[in-house]
Image: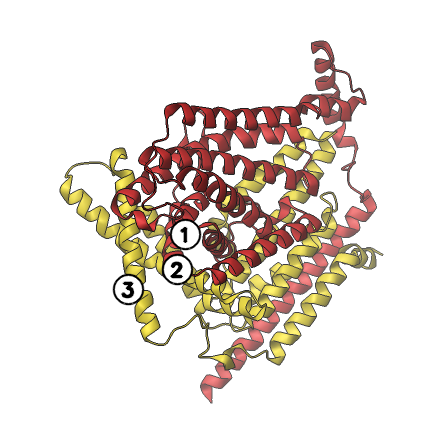
Amino acid sequence: MHMADALINTGVAAVMFGLTAGTSAYSIHTIKKSEEPVKVPEMGIMGAFVFAAQMINFAIPGTGSSGHICGSMLLSAMLGPSAGFITMMGILIIQCLMFADGGIMALGANIWNMAFYGCFIGAGIIWRSMVKNGASKRKITAASIIGCIVTLQLGAFSVTLETLISGVTTLPFKVFVSFMQPIHLAIGAVEGIITAAVLCFVFETKPDLLWGVKENGKKERLSYGKVMTILGITAIFIAGGLSLLASSLPDGLEWSVERVTGDTEIISEGQVYDTFSDVQDKTALLPDYAFSGSDSKFGTSFSGIVGGIAVIGVCVLFCIMIKVLRKRKECNDEQV
Amino acid sequence: MNRFDNMLGEMCSIDREASKEGWLNEMHPLVKLLVTIWYICFVISFKNNMLTGILSMSVYLIICFLMADISLYKCLKRMRTVLFAFFIIGGANILFSENFSTGVTGAAGFWCKGVMSVFAVYILIVTTSIDDICEALRMLHVPGLLVTVIMLIYRYINILIKETKRLSESYFVLSPGQKGIHIKAWGQFAGNLMLRSIDRAKRVYDSMNMAGYEWRILSGNRKKYKLGAGSLMWLFVWTGVIAVFRIIPVFELVGNMLAG
């Protein structure tokens, strides 16, 4: 889900940086205000754990795709939403600045999509509400799976919205959503299972390490009925919400046809064939034209090519000259 | 385990490259960070169909790659996943554009912008160590807690990988002939690894505290991080050049002059 710089425009990047800065200021304020000592070593090692876990991609059956865990839910279930958010920020900054995974301009958006939802919605709301009266393996499993699915869906949806608002791709909204949401549903489910397995082990071994779990609380068991109700509501929210949103927007094919023919009506099969033949006609005509979408006319493009070669040539010569001069200087220094 | 070994190897390799002596490596980290952000801002501000303009921004990359002796092959190898993602997303422009030629132009512009912004970040990471980046972040008034966490995550990766190796070796000794860790043991393995690593990290952190560490970042070598004339010149020159290349169609102007 790491967005690259080219997927976002400057305005959207600035807004996302603003939101992220605000959330991180709130998180740091909360951590400092807290009476508990700051869990700096835990934040560091848990960050390293999630960082390493993100390197391991698992296959998504039947899709030919793969995914990796996001980890914000796991972090926050151990450290709390605020410390989890700061740790997740640290991971994403390292990935961006040390491994070029996710762009610098898109860093704010990446932090928001991958850290905010997982930490403040996944752990802050879902995890907390499910374990506040005492934890059990079932509750932990249910909270982890629901939390991971919901937060990854929200994150994936945000990626789609940010790309769409940035206007960097002509990929229609519904097509993009139909790619992003189902694949992240599968990734969320797998992540939920992994998170649940780890947290259940921690619960059995060192339950005091889990955040928000009332130690001597009433050991309430979450009934299957409750789990199914929560899962059902989540499914209705995601599916219903998305379909409502999607239904108000044109279908991917409709959108393409409308852009090509100017006709907004749903078209029959014959017209689709016509559309394809229209596209083919356009494709066949390409040799007679320069790139029609480009602002540059042929003459300008030619000038651009000549100028580009000249400027790059000058740059290369300049660099070679500097390097030769430096080497000479080094040789002279050695001789002295 | 191979993946962890490769990851560690890759990290060490990047660390070595970032720490080696070099003209660009010794440049002030804040200046490099600001120039990179400035450059990316201007590159992504181009519309996808302004190919000539986008390509003119490659001047910065060419100069940095040549001056700092950065290997293009290594860059492409390390960034292959990101570049592949650009290829796929950019390709969608061709499918969903109103005509083929617009789509191809849009895709080409998208690819160029993506590749150039990734290359700019790559230049930053292979010439700047994690300590330098943290110092730059501190100068930008990023909170100390966040910078400390960044440094600790980076340093603790080593601890985690060593602990993983130790745990997996003991697992395979107990389960001879088994290929990989059994799926039923994943949760226990990961949980165990986490708890053991937390204990070790706490011990390391306690030792750091006993040695006088207290959320202070890089207080030892302030002289190294003083803004020199060279760094300032690099900042002002590139700020100006990048802005000029964004506003004026330099390639076309030079081409017109040469072509008459």
Q: Amino acid at mark 3?
A: Arg
Q: Chain of mark 2?
A: A
Q: Are marks 2 and 1 in contact (CB under 8 Å)?
A: yes
For residue B203, the mark is 3
**Residue under label 1:** A79
Q: Are marks 1 and 3 in contact (CB under 8 Å)?
A: no
Q: Which chain is red?
A: A
Q: Is residue B100 left or right of residue A104?
A: right
Q: Is residue B220 left or right of residue A315?
A: left
Vertical arrangement, residue B90 with respect to residue A41, above or below? above
The colour mode here is: by chain
Tags 2 and 1 both on a single chain: yes
Which of the two residues, A270 or A54, is positioned nearer the viewer here?
A54
Q: Amino acid at mark 2?
A: Lys
**Residue under label 2:** A39
> In terms of image quadrants, where is residue B206?
bottom left
Asked which secondary structure carries label 3, the reply is helix
> Measuring 37% from the left and 24% from the top, which residue is drawn there?
A224
Q: Residues within 10 Å of mark 3 (few under 14, many from 20)?
A: few
Image x and y of residue B95, in percent: 66, 29
Q: Which chain is yellow?
A: B
Q: Earlier in the sequence, mark 2 or mark 1?
A: 2
> In terms of image quadrants, where is residue A271?
top right
